[in-house]
Amino acid sequence: MINFFKALILFFLLFSGSIFGQNLIGFNAFYMQTKIAGDSSGMNKMMFAEPGYGFGIAYKHMELRNIIGFQGEINIQNTGFMVKPQPYFEDEPDTAFYKLRSKHINIPLFMHLDFGQHSVKAVFAIGTYADFLLEKSKPETNMTVFDSTGVERIANGKFNTFTYGLTSLAGIAFCTKYGVFQFTMRASIGMSKMIKINEVALLSFITDRSLGFGVSYFKPFGKEPYYTKKEKIKKEEKLEETTPDISEKEDNPKADNVELEEEKTDKNAPTEEDLDWEQRFDN
């Protein structure tokens, strides 16, 4: 898995070096539900999701007619999890719980495909992430006795400062003259141990899970955005349709001569009848 993670990062770095694509930079924010899971199906019944959120900067690179590309982010992420002894340990009260929150630097890298028109696109992406633990809060709990509950294995476990996993997102992007607005659902699953458990009984390791939604804003830089170029082309085509065709005038020079003669004619000039009357009057 580690080799796959390194290879994917290397591919993204090489891919982003292309000068032929469209580059966009911006920021994103997201809300999610996070929980933990382990290698014991019984213990997993005790684990529940807690709300979390994140925000940070984002970079997007588009290639191949703006269909395929990649997206990278650097986020500050706040997550949490809750463990309840019920229903696995029936002798504990229903109100018993153990909560813990933590702050991370989260760096996801997505390979994505964008489908649709130039102004509205469907976005599908999959990738990997690296997660660095900054701090964890003091646990919140109303439990006084941890023995025989299994929660003590989590409470006394060692948190790893570096974890990694798989991540994905899907949503829709609106390309406007003000920038790109992207709305997505996102999910991630840990592929490394988040908490190391010393005892083998019941549980030996913990990984993290998350599911949520987010919004991103990107501003193109460098060359002109592809979607504004297409808007200009459409406007030019409409202008050509409404402009009268002058090819007929070029093929018929007599029509131009008639128009010129009409322009040269003075409306106030005397007519032949007026001249004839004046001549008779003088005689």
Image (spheres, grey):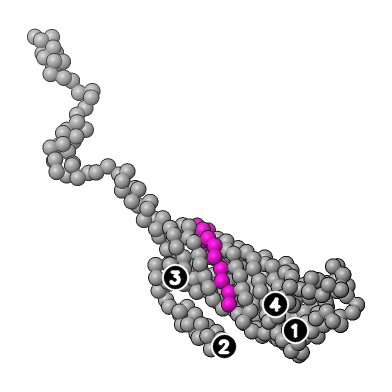
Q: Nearer the viewer, residue 194 or 153?
A: 153
| Cα separation between marks 3 and 1 | 44 Å
Q: Quadrant of residue 72?
A: bottom right
Residue 2 marker: 2
Q: Nearer the viewer, mark 3 or mark 1?
A: 1
Residue 202 marker: 1
SS for callout 3? strand
SS for callout 4? helix
Q: Quadrant of residue 54?
A: bottom right
**What's the residue at 53%, 60% (across, down)?**
172
| Cα separation between marks 1 and 2 | 27 Å
Amino acid type for the residue under numbered disc 2: Ile
| Cα separation between marks 2 and 3 | 25 Å
Do the CB atoms of the residues marked 1 and 2 lie less than 8 Å apart? no
Which quadrant holds the N terminus?
A: bottom right
| Cα separation between marks 1 and 4 | 9 Å
Q: Which residue is mark 3?
A: 68
Residue 41 marker: 4
Question: Which region shows up in magenta?
Answer: 166-180
| Image spot of residue 189 (x, y percent) | 62, 76
Q: Is residue 112 above or below residue 14?
A: above
